[in-house]
Image: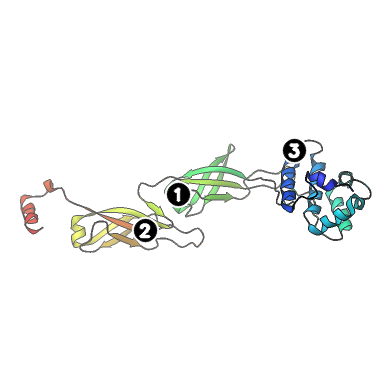
Amino acid sequence: MSDSLYETLGVDKSASSDDIKKAYRKLARKYHPDINKSPDAEEKFKEINAAYEILSDEEKRRQYDTRGDSMFGGQNFSDFARNAGDMGDLNEILRNIFGGSGFNFSGGFSQGFGGFSEDLDINANLTMDFEDAILGGEKEISLNGKSIKIRIPAGVDDGDKLRVRGKGSVSQRSNQRGDLILNLSVRPSSEYTRKGDDLYKTIDIPLKTALFGGKMSVKTPKKDVTIKIGENSKNAQKIRLKGYGVQNRKTKIYGDLYLNVNIILPDISSLDDETIKILKEKL
């Protein structure tokens, strides 16, 4: 009894299902017609797929181990697969032989063959400013000499990946198009520190405002806001601005902005003698 199916995949008859899968993936990549341009690559690829479809199925493999090449009309498997015509013919013949469906050699090489797929995606790096990352918006980039516009969603972070549909490579066989996958790098901000969806920044407050309270304007990524400073504010005290942080990409809920109070002391040389005298007496 010939073991031609096993020979096609280059494995022993005692090979495990994992061994068969590994051998198939290696060969499928080697002989894929979009990768291998030799004249017989497509026939070899069809042969490999048919062998894997049978040996990866426990019941079909059992039938083949029992009957061998006799089920292919006396031909060895390689000759049988080559003589079957196109993928559609081979589908139908194998369905009849094994009594059911499960074969799908329609010529689409991107699916149905044990996880092997034609990789049409393009990877590229994109560096962006901190505020562009948290606010999002439209950005124009150059890819392979062509200028394309992409939309950056609000809330992306350093190390994120952004998939741009339909901007990858085009398959010569199926005319399908892959995606552009951008690996994002975000420049640090001199003003903000980001922790998840929350932002942190330091604000300078005059001593008078810290002691007696008052109002002051603060810049946030959204807009400038006026905040109230309470009396007797302490240095390093935190003020929370709810909803003024980063918008979460999934939930669309905004994080918070935390203001770290830095009290600015006056230069003693700028004060008059009377004020200095009072401070010395009272402090």
Relative to 16, is 231 on the left or the right? left
From mark 1 to mark 3, how far is it between C-alphas? 43 Å
Q: Amino acid at mark 3?
A: Asn
Picture quadrant of residue 220: bottom left
From mark 1 to mark 2, how far is it between C-alphas? 17 Å
Quadrant in the picture for the C terminus:
bottom left
In front here: 222 or 81?
81
Residue identified by numbered label 3? 36
Q: Amino acid at mark 2?
A: Leu
**Residue 174 visible:** no
Residue identified by numbered label 2? 257
Relative to 160, is 86 on the left or the right? right
The 10 Å Cα crowd at callout 3, few under 14, some 14 to 19, many 20 or more, is: some
Q: Secondary structure at mark 2?
A: strand
Query: What's the residue at 18%, 51% (across, down)?
Result: 265
In front: label 1 or label 3: 3
In front: label 2 or label 3: 3
Which mark is on residue 132?
Answer: 1
